[in-house]
Image (cartoon, rainbow, N blue to C red):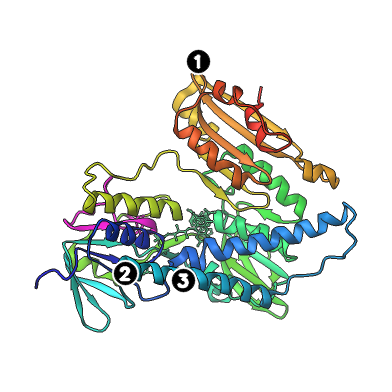
């Protein structure tokens, strides 16, 4: 069989789309295989619908705060059905745009499930086959389901987006990104929220900021239980209860339980064993620094590889791979260092570079930390006393900035530019030499002692 394409991409999520677009731009004949909607997790079950809810939650909070400024309208609850329609229309426009752009780029879209029958050949659900010297696995991940009694009584993140109304009492099991984000936004939308985590929240973020975030959550009325061991869910007259090994009696009852216990890669039905593609101990497709698997011609990008499960990482990785395979850029590869990331908590929290703990482990006595705690003007105006927290982690005589950590309103929007600066290797004196923009929260980053 002669190759039907130069590249076959499995999965049209963030990573797969980016790989396909970039390869097509370099002139490759690309087939993009996707059984579901274009856009994958981020557009349909992740970043986009989540951020829409976060924005709604933000406005719910701000409606309440605005009354303290003199607005006299009494804020009412969100009409979830209406909100879902607005959000679906927005997502529909993204879908449509992807379909148009793929057509313009000349990418052949195959709306089917695919599996390997040889290293260079995939078989589609309708029995047809496609062949190419390069195949990229970009099949992403899905919510982890625990094998415990009553798990099916709860929801996973995919299900949350289908809710028509706010559940009154919500339990969230887990302490990672998804758990913390939904805790904040559901609380702001009027739900009563309890979090049940096994260990500290957001283990990859700076401990001091996480502790400050917990104070914010406490102030908002979110109950956070750590060291829990949820091993069953049961239906009772008044809702669902959770059996927690750390407690004598059950927790609850709740109207909804969200299991936010991590994600598992989509690899099972790809026929990887038939072609010998190696996986790591968590089932992720094992890749080297070039996104190559152990099988020549088979590559992988994005969540299925388990490395920094973020949309911009999947996108940048896919582009770099396409540049290397089809753009003549032999050295192109993803730089996994200093990836900025934000958790859309209430308020948002971001990090780039090393946490204080990581820096001290790596650089010992050479670490110098600068912090700023302050009440943002918008909060102070309405009598809120909570504080933002910003931290610069610096190393050496010249105080090279190796970590920036932000918690507070607009942290999500502030971090991007400072991440560029950190990646360029700035020192504290470069921040000191930059004129502040006043009055903002961001100015604190150039005014620290
Ligand atoms: C609730 C939630 C919120 C998130 N929020 C953010 C955020 O704010 N910012 C951020 O950066 N990241 C966020 N993420 C993470 C982000 O969504 C992922 O990192 C990103 O979508 C990964 O892209 P991907 O291309 O690797 O996989 P996916 O987007 O999951 O795409 C994989 C695609 O492969 C398809 N597929 C599966 N099997 C096959 C097969 N056999 N053949 C062909 N196709 C197949 C799937 O249908 C899917 O469309 C969030 C995730 C979740 C769950
Ligand atoms: N804002 C963003 O950029 C954003 C938002 C959401 C998700 N994401 C990405 O998606 C990834 C997945 O998010 P996530 O929250 O699903 O996973 P996560 O890895 O961030 O958190 C998983 C949580 O589940 C807990 N857990 C695991 N097994 C458990 C068990 N058996 N019982 C109880 N708790 C258990 C872990 O201790 C952890 O607290 C993130 O790591 C992140 O990369 C990013």
**Residue at the extreme left:** 1
N-terminal label among 2 and 3: 3
> What residue is pinned by disc 2?
268
Distance of label 1 from label 3 (alpha carbons) = 51 Å
> Residue 187 or 207: which is nearer the viewer?
187
Q: Residues within 10 Å of mark 1 (few under 14, many from 20)?
A: few
> What residue is pinned by disc 1?
397
Could you tell me which residue is drawn at 55 percent across and 54 percent down? 177
Q: Is residue 244 visible?
A: no
Q: Give yes or no for residue 100 being in the magenta stretch.
A: no
> What residue is pinned by disc 3?
95
On the image, the x and y values in percent for residue 408 come to: 68, 44
Residue stretch rendered in magenta on the structure: 281-305
Which label was assigned to residue 362?
none
Q: Secondary structure at mark 2?
A: helix
Q: Is residue 361 left or right of residue 281?
A: right
Could you tell me which residue is drawn at 20 percent across and 54 percent down? 294
> Residue 136 or 197: which is nearer the viewer?
136
N-terminal label among 2 and 1: 2
């Amino acid at each position: 069989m002669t190759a039907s394409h130069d590249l076959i991409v499995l999965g049209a999520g963030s990573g797969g789309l980016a790989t396909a677009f970039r390869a097509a731009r370099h002139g490759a004949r690309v087939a993009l295989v996707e059984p579901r909607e274009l856009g994958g997790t981020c557009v349909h079950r992740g970043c986009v619908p989540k951020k829409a809810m976060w924005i709604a939650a933000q406005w719910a909070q701000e409606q309440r705060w605005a009354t303290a400024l003199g607005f006299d309208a009494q804020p009412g609850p969100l009409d979830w059905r209406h909100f879902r329609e607005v959000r679906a229309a927005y997502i529909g426009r993204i879908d449509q745009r992807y379909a148009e752009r793929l057509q313009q780029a000349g990418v052949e879209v195959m709306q089917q499930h695919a599996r390997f029958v040889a290293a260079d050949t995939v078989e589609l659900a309708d029995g047809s086959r496609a062949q190419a010297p390069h195949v990229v696995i970009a099949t992403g991940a899905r919510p982890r389901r625990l094998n415990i009694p009553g798990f099916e009584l709860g929801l996973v993140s995919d299900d949350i987006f289908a809710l028509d109304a706010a559940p009154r009492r919500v339990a969230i099991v887990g302490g990672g990104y998804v758990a913390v984000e939904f805790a904040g936004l559901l609380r702001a939308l009027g739900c009563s929220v309890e979090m049940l985590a096994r260990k500290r929240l957001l283990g990859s973020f700076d401990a001091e900021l996480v502790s400050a975030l917990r104070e914010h959550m406490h102030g908002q009325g979110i109950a956070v239980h750590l060291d829990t061991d949820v091993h069953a869910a049961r239906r009772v007259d008044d809702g669902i209860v959770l059996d927690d090994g750390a407690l004598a009696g059950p927790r609850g009852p709740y109207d909804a339980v969200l299991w936010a216990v991590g994600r598992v890669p989509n690899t099972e039905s790809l026929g990887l064993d038939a072609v010998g593609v190696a996986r790591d101990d968590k089932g992720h497709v094992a890749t080297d620094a070039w996104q190559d698997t152990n099988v020549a011609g088979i590559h992988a990008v994005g969540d299925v590889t388990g490395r920094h499960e973020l949309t911009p990482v999947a996108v940048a990785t896919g582009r770099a791979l396409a540049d290397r395979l089809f753009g003549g850029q032999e050295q192109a590869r993803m730089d996994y260092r200093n990836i900025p990331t934000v958790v859309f908590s209430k308020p948002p929290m971001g990090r780039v570079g090393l946490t204080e703990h990581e820096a001290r482990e790596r650089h010992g006595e050479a670490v110098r930390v600068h912090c700023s705690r302050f009440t943002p003007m918008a909060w102070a105006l309405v009598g809120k006393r909570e504080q933002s927290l910003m931290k610069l982690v610096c190393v050496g005589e010249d105080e090279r900035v190796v970590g920036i950590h932000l918690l507070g309103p607009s942290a999500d929007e502030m971090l991007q530019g400072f991440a560029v600066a950190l990646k360029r290797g700035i020192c504290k004196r470069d921040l000191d030499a930059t004129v502040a923009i006043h009055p903002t929260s961001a100015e604190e980053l150039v005014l620290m002692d």
